[in-house]
Image (spheres, rainbow, N blue to C red):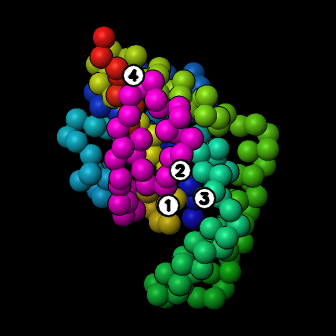
């Protein structure tokens, strides 16, 4: 249905993390996802950063936002909805709503909404600088259902905070790109 960008943080104060993200036009809303919880370490916390409807059109997924990707995903979702017993009318309404959401996301993207590689690098650097935070990372996922029930097959990749920006430019869907502070 939609792309969402979230962060995963090891350690730190939830309120301080939210304050840091708000300085960058985002937010840190705690999100519990059973599938993701199994893949995270016990002291890692997952936060949804989205302020608006979704993060479709994000700079983090130029290859993932192609029309082919959207059409392929839409076909899969329609098949899933049919299996659930949705009527053709309800599916048509869902498609219309999805199209409107995608159009809104594209308009937001065109208005230079806060979404750049520099923004995400600055967010991660600022979050890592918070007392008690040991590492922080970005996760991009295309949710096809409810965010708390969604199955996510997470792939972790840890990089030094110095290499984070370069690696962020190549982030993949469902890859948790973790920035680890460099030793002093």
- The residue to which callout 1 is attached is 143
Q: Residue furthest top?
A: 184
Assess whether mark 2 and mark 1 are in contact (beta carbons under 8 angstroms).
yes
- Image side of residue 159 versus residue 56, left or right: left
- The residue to which callout 4 is attached is 128
Q: Earlier in the sequence, mark 4 or mark 2?
A: 2
Q: Which residue is rendered at x = 49% and y = 38% of the image?
A: 167
- Comparing marks 3 and 1, which lies closer to the viewer? 3
Mark 3 → mark 2, Cα distance in angstroms = 12 Å
Mark 4 → mark 2, Cα distance in angstroms = 21 Å
Q: Earlier in the sequence, mark 3 or mark 2?
A: 2
Q: Earlier in the sequence, mark 3 or mark 4?
A: 3
Local packing at callout 1 (Cα closer than 10 Å; few below 14, some 14-19, many 20+) is some
- The residue to which callout 2 is attached is 4
Q: Which one is nearer the viewer's eye here, 58 or 52? A: 58
Q: Identify whether 65 is placed above or below 175.
A: below
Assess whether mark 4 and mark 1 are in contact (beta carbons under 8 angstroms).
no
């Amino acid at each position: 249905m939609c792309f969402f960008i979230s962060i995963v943080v090891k350690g730190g104060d939830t309120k301080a993390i939210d304050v840091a993200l708000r300085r960058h036009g985002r937010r840190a809303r705690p999100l519990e996802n059973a599938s993701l919880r199994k893949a995270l370490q016990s002291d890692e916390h997952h936060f949804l950063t989205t302020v608006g409807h979704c993060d479709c059109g994000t700079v983090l997924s130029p290859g993932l936002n192609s029309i082919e990707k959207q059409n392929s995903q839409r076909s899969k979702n329609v098949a899933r909805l049919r299996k659930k017993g949705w009527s053709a009318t309800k599916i048509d309404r869902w498609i219309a709503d999805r199209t409107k959401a995608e159009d809104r996301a594209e308009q937001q993207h065109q208005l230079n909404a806060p979404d750049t590689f520099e923004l995400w690098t600055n967010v991660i650097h600022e979050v890592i600088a918070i007392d008690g935070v040991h590492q922080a990372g970005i996760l991009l996922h295309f949710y096809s259902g409810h965010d708390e029930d969604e199955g996510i097959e997470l792939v972790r990749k840890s990089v030094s905070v110095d290499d984070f920006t370069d690696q962020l430019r190549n982030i993949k869907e469902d890859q948790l790109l973790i920035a680890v502070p460099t030793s002093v």
